């Protein structure tokens, strides 16, 4: 019975990381499709917020909050990187042995995680703008 208790840490620290790495090879297609779907969702989330921001900016004395501007900048960068990655994957030569899928699959999975974080942040903005004090003329 003691040997079973000793195997649990070995499995957690040695076998699970290997299985995760093999998962990138096995799940290549689903990782790329997931990235494509999440990129579209992030683009839609940005587009949902943009009209509200534009409308509020037209009002005199309103400014976009710094965290909203930072989020929009980060989202634009992430979307551009994802589109470039997806375009490169479409144009890449297909490999025969399957091992050339590891790095693109891993990149797709990591980018999908970033997108999920930004999607969550986009849902958390209570207010998009703030009033600025009127300046003396």
Image (tube, rainbow, N blue to C red):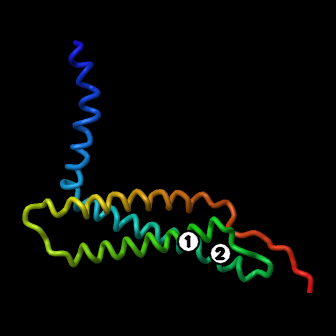
Q: Which residue is mark 1?
A: 72
- Which numbered mark, 2 or 1, is in the foreground of this view? 1
Q: Which residue was labeled with disc 2? A: 53
Q: Which residue appears at 23% of the width and 49% of the height?
A: 21
Q: Is residue 66 left or right of residue 87?
A: right
Image quadrant occupied by the N terminus: top left
Answer with left or right where residue 30 lies relative to residue 124.
Answer: left
3D distance between C-alphas at marks 2 and 1: 11 Å
- Sequence-earlier tag: 2 or 1: 2
Secondary structure at badge 2 equals: helix
Tell me whether the residue at label 2 lies in contact with that at label 1, contact meaning CB atoms closer than 8 angstroms: yes
Is residue 96 found left or right of 88 in the rendered image?
Answer: left
View extreme (right): residue = 136
In the image, residue 134 sits, relative to residue 35, either above or below, namely below
What SS does tag 1 mark? helix
- The structure residue drawn at horizontal position 62% and vertical position 67%, both measured from the top left corner, is 68
Residue 13 screen position, x and y as percent: 28, 35
């Amino acid at each position: 019975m003691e040997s079973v208790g000793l195997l649990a840490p070995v499995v957690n620290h040695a076998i699970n990381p290997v299985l995760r790495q093999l998962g990138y090879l096995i799940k290549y297609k689903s990782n790329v499709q997931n990235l494509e779907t999440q990129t579209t969702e992030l683009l839609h989330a940005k587009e949902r917020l943009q009209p509200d921001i534009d409308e509020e900016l037209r009002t005199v004395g309103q400014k976009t909050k710094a965290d909203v501007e930072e989020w929009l900048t980060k989202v634009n960068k992430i979307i551009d990187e994802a589109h470039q990655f997806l375009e490169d994957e479409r144009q890449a030569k297909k490999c025969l042995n399957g091992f050339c899928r590891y790095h693109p699959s891993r990149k797709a999975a990591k980018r999908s995680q970033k997108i999920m974080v930004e999607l969550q942040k986009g849902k958390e903005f209570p207010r998009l703008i703030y009033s600025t004090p009127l300046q003396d003329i």
